[in-house]
Amino acid sequence: MTAFAPADLVTSWVVSPFGTGLALFLTVSYAAGLVALRRSGEAVPVLRSLAYYVVGVGSLVLATDGGLAASRGTSFVAAAAQSAVLAAVTPVGIALGDPVGLARRALGAGRTRGLDRLLGSRGARVVMFPLLASVVATALHLLLFTTPWLAGSVSHGWLREATYAVLLVSGLVFVLPLLTEELVPAWCTAGVLVLIAFVDGLLDAVPGVVVMASPALLGAPVATFLAAQDALWQQRLGGGAMFGVAEVVGLPLLAATVLAWVRSDAREAAIVDARLDREARERQGDDGAPDGVRDRPWWETDPRFTRRSP
């Protein structure tokens, strides 16, 4: 087992069929959406685009084609860091680019009906509910390091590529609904999403803590994979890398959900204030509105309460 150095991230390269193909697809499709927006005269989200390409696509390329992928067969630290990047960093970068919203704006409502039906189906709502998705993603990450899965992915190319896909998809089905209001149930308000993001921050730390704090090597397959005198030390370093990456991503994600909460409350407050002003003008003008409508308490007509589905 060789030591993994930070310089290896950009000096060692391999070709991953899944990573390379997905990076090309994400790059071209998002660029096409941006071009369509510009042609229609709509504003192009510069910061979202930068986050998408730099954090999302960039981390995907480094994790599947860069030094993390090149060294994952000889360095447990690289394998652990790679799994954390694919499960946490890449999904957040892609979600910050709001690809679903971009597709809807670029293609128009008529051409995204199939996508809307898919994302709005009961099955998709269950799978993509943030709390459930977070638990599933954490469980999959734990299984990778406590079963022969990791060692098998080092020995078999098809399993390696499938592992990349599983880690990335499990992260996306959690992060996309968390940062896209239209993908969660109506009762899952911005405040609830903040709570879920906080819980996810705790859950994301579990795989790293388990790997880092384990007093022995995690199973015979991993012990074979870490065939070196300092194998336990490398395992602890790998767990620390997983923990660090998860928390570095978790805090900004929590901050993003809090900011979305503040903006949501500001929008709702503006809507309620406008409606109350309109009703006050109607009462002052005596426009003939029924007394029962004019005199109802504000909380009985506030859309935040009356339109909330069970």
Image (spheres, grey):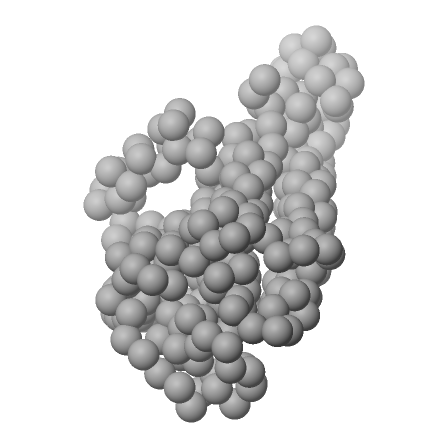
Quarter of image, res 187 = top right
Is 298 placed left or right of 118 in the picture?
A: right
* Residue 63 drawn at (x, y percent): 43, 71
Q: Height in image: 120 above or below 75?
A: above
Is residue 249 left or right of 165 when viewed as pictured?
right
Quarter of the figure with residue 127:
top left
- Give the position of the C terminus as an image quadrant: top right
* Residue 237 image point, x, y percent: 66, 70
- Measured as percent of width and height from the top left, residue 117 is found at 30, 33
Query: Which residue corresponds to the image point at 42% horizontal and 71% vertical from the top-left?
Result: 73
Instruction: Note whether residue 298 is visible.
Output: yes
Above or below 15: residue 165: above
Query: At x 35% / y 83%, what residue is drawn?
Result: 13
Q: Name the residue at 63% across, 15% down.
A: 288
Left or right relative to 142: residue 280:
right
Q: Where residue 305 sits: x, y (%)?
A: 67, 24
Can you see residue 178?
no
Q: Residue furthest left?
A: 111
Establish if 22 lies above or below 109.
Answer: below
Q: Nearer the viewer, residue 154 or 82?
A: 154
Q: Give the camera-side residue of 29 and 284.
A: 29
Q: Is residue 214 left or right of residue 146?
A: right
**Residue shown at 26%/44% (left/top)?**
112
